[in-house]
Image (cartoon, rainbow, N blue to C red):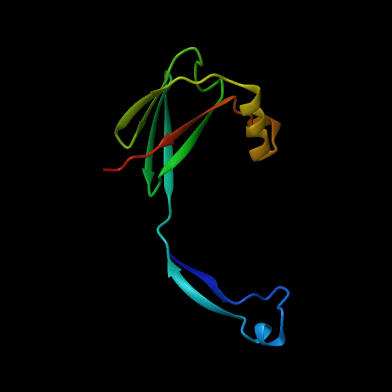
Amino acid sequence: MPVDHLVKKGTLRRAESYEAWLNYCATRSRSTFEGARIEVVNLGNNRFRPKTMHVESYSLWLHPNMVDFDRPVSVTTDGVAAEYVCEPSLLTALESFKRRHDWGLIYYASISVDVNHH
């Protein structure tokens, strides 16, 4: 998808001289970037199936209504299966609140997944 952006040359803030100020320029440009996408299906029974596109890593935030923390969590990303043991923690819950600033969206644990596309 094409995206408009600025290409800057020089420093506009606090130019040391009139010449430095004259050397600053900003040019409008258009570039195409490949967007990232991830779609995760909660299959129940501590199993998740994420499908990704242009994603190198992601975090899966978990709530007690989503998983049983006493059992491993199975995550099959783009057909590659892995199991994770995670424990709820106050620190993770506070990090979760910091991300959204909503007490209704508190997650007690998270899993970090590196995506390996071969």
Q: Residue furthest front?
A: 16
Q: Residue at x 66, y 83 (%)?
A: 20
- Counting from the top left corner in percent of width and height, residue 37 is at 42, 47
Would residue 101 be found to the left or right of residue 39 on screen?
right
Q: Residue at x 61, y 28 (%)?
A: 92
Q: Residue at x 65, y 39 (%)?
A: 100
- Which of these two is toward me, 105 or 91? 91
Q: Residue furthest left?
A: 118
Please tell me in which quadrant of the rendered image residue 77 appears: top left
Q: Residue at x 60, y 28 (%)?
A: 107
- Counting from the top left corner in percent of width and height, residue 113 is at 43, 34
Would residue 25 be found to the left or right of residue 30 on screen?
right
Above or below, 3 against 77 in this view is below
- Counting from the top left corner in percent of width and height, residue 105 is at 63, 32
- Which of these two is toward me, 15 or 34? 15
- Counting from the top left corner in percent of width and height, residue 50 is at 39, 35
